[in-house]
Image (cartoon, grey):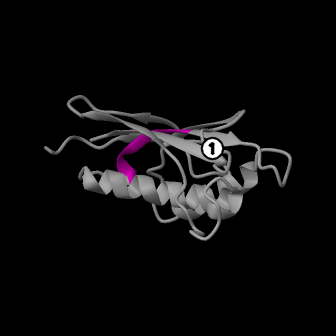
């Protein structure tokens, strides 16, 4: 892919999360819309429709971000090229609610070394996903 000018990141003042308020995409950049990704199995011995197979929201968030990182690397892109993430979370049955704190902790850990080149983000709670054990799905837009 050809080189393009850098993305422009507008920080969120006093944010507790590594997110941008907005990300500008320069002229000439190609925009990529990645399909939603779900968490990886962390316990192959657990039934695939049980939460134990994928872990809690924190673990599922980390494994999904790592999966996205690998997909992007295969496209000669990186998480630094991500301009927006839509996070769809399901209520954790063990908590009785969406685990935003677990999601945000994994998000912060994953993006800790990325300076302020963070994507803009939307987090919403949904009723469910295809697999009842999945607690989230992440959809990404990248540009380079």
Residue 82 sits inside the magenta stretch: yes
Tell me, yes or no, if residue 53 can be seen here.
Answer: yes
Q: Specify the principal SS of the magenta part.
A: strand
Looking at the picture, how far across and down is residue 130, in whole percent?
A: 60, 39
130 and 24: which is toward the camera: 130
Left or right: where 71 falls relative to 109: left
Q: Residue at x 63, y 49 (%)?
A: 134
Q: Residue at x 30, y 56 (%)?
A: 73
Left or right: where 126 falls relative to 138: right
Task: Residue under label 1, please give it.
Answer: 13
Residue furthest right as drawn: 96
Q: Residues within 10 Å of mark 1 (few under 14, many from 20)?
A: few
Residue furthest left as drawn: 2
29 and 58: which is toward the camera: 58
Residue 26 sits inside the magenta stretch: no
Q: Residue at x 57, y 52 (%)?
A: 18
Q: Is residue 65 positioned above or below 130 on the image? A: below
- Quarter of image, res 102: bottom right
Looking at the picture, how far across and down is residue 43, in whole percent?
A: 60, 69
Q: Which residues are magenta?
A: 79-86
Badge 1 element: loop
Q: Quadrant of the N terminus?
A: top left
Q: Quadrant of the C terminus?
A: top left
Number of numbered discs: 1
Q: Residue at x 59, y 42 (%)?
A: 12
Left or right: where 15 falls relative to 27: right
Q: Is residue 96 positioned above or below 56 on the image? A: above
């Amino acid at each position: 892919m050809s080189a393009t000018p850098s993305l422009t990141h507008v920080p969120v003042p006093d944010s507790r999360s590594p997110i941008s308020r907005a990300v500008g995409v320069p002229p000439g950049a190609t925009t990529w819309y990645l399909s939603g990704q779900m968490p990886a199995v962390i316990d192959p011995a657990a039934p695939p429709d049980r939460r134990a197979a994928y872990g809690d929201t924190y673990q599922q968030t980390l494994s999904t971000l790592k999966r996205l990182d690998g997909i992007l690397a295969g496209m000669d892109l990186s998480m630094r090229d991500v301009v927006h993430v839509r996070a769809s979370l399901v209520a954790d049955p063990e908590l009785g609610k969406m685990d935003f704190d677990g999601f945000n902790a994994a998000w912060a850990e994953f993006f800790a070394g990325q300076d302020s080149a963070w994507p803009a983000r939307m987090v919403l709670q949904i009723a469910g996903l295809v697999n009842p054990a999945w607690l989230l799905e992440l959809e990404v837009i990248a540009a380079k």
